[in-house]
Image (tube, rainbow, N blue to C red):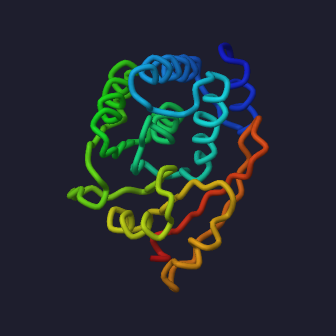
Amino acid sequence: MNGNPALADGVRTLGIDLSAEAIARFERYLDLLEKWNAVINLTAVRERSRMVTLHLLDSLTVVPRLAGKNRLLDVGSGAGMPGIPLAIALPHLQVTLLEANQKKAAFLRQARLELGLDNVQVVAERVEQWQTEERFDAVVSRAFSDLPDFVASARRLLAPDGSIIAMKGVVPFEEISRLAPDLVPEVVPVTVPHLSAERHLIVIGANRT
């Protein structure tokens, strides 16, 4: 695996097998983030090496939770995390990026075009207002700060066997305590290569809603 050593090492540590084409797409994605970040505020992370860790590798920690899943919704996608990295790593996965900010949605559309991601679609809507008949095997977000609000917005979009996945730092015990009593989340600690900070996935299956 050629290209960015930190990315290559991190992907190996996560146990993910990426093609040379996928690695090239990740590099191009980083190029686009750097280019557009100079014009609009996509991310506060400016250094490319930190983008690899905090954006790409962090996003890829979700991969094991997507086994057997075909349709993913990324709510509040922002600059495309985790949806774009997951779409690159898992080309069979149909990924919808939901982002209400029009400038960020414009970036997402351009990234989809330039990266040749035919498995990605971009929707410029707020999740609370989005009307769709689509149902998803997984609904994921890094952007929602409040878990109960995310669950309330996302659960109607789940397929019968789908799951909600909230990406968090430390375990949000206070937010979990405000979930409905019938919702019992699975708290999954994950390790991001080259990062010492805590990361957790809060997973709620459709059968728990």
Residue at left offset 49%, top offset 31%: 88
- Percent position (x, y) of residue 104? 35, 34
Q: Please give left or right for residue 96 compared with residue 53 in the image.
A: left
- Percent position (x, y) of residue 150? 43, 63
Residue closest to the eye, 119 or 175: 175
> Which quadrant holds the N terminus?
top right
- Percent position (x, y) of residue 135? 32, 58
Residue closest to the eye, 83 or 135: 83
Q: Please give left or right for residue 18 compared with residue 114 in the image.
A: right
Residue closest to the eye, 4 or 87: 4
Residue 56, quarter of the rendered image: top right
Q: Please give left or right for residue 156 compared with residue 8 in the image.
A: left
Residue closest to the eye, 123 or 89: 123
> Which quadrant holds the C terminus?
bottom left
Residue at left offset 36%, top offset 42%: 97
Residue at left offset 61%, top offset 29%: 51
Q: Please give left or right for residue 164 compared with residue 187 in the image.
A: left
* Extreme residue toward the bottom, this view: 181
* Extreme residue toward the top, this view: 2
Up/down of 70 relative to 26, above or below: below
Up/down of 181 relative to 12, above or below: below
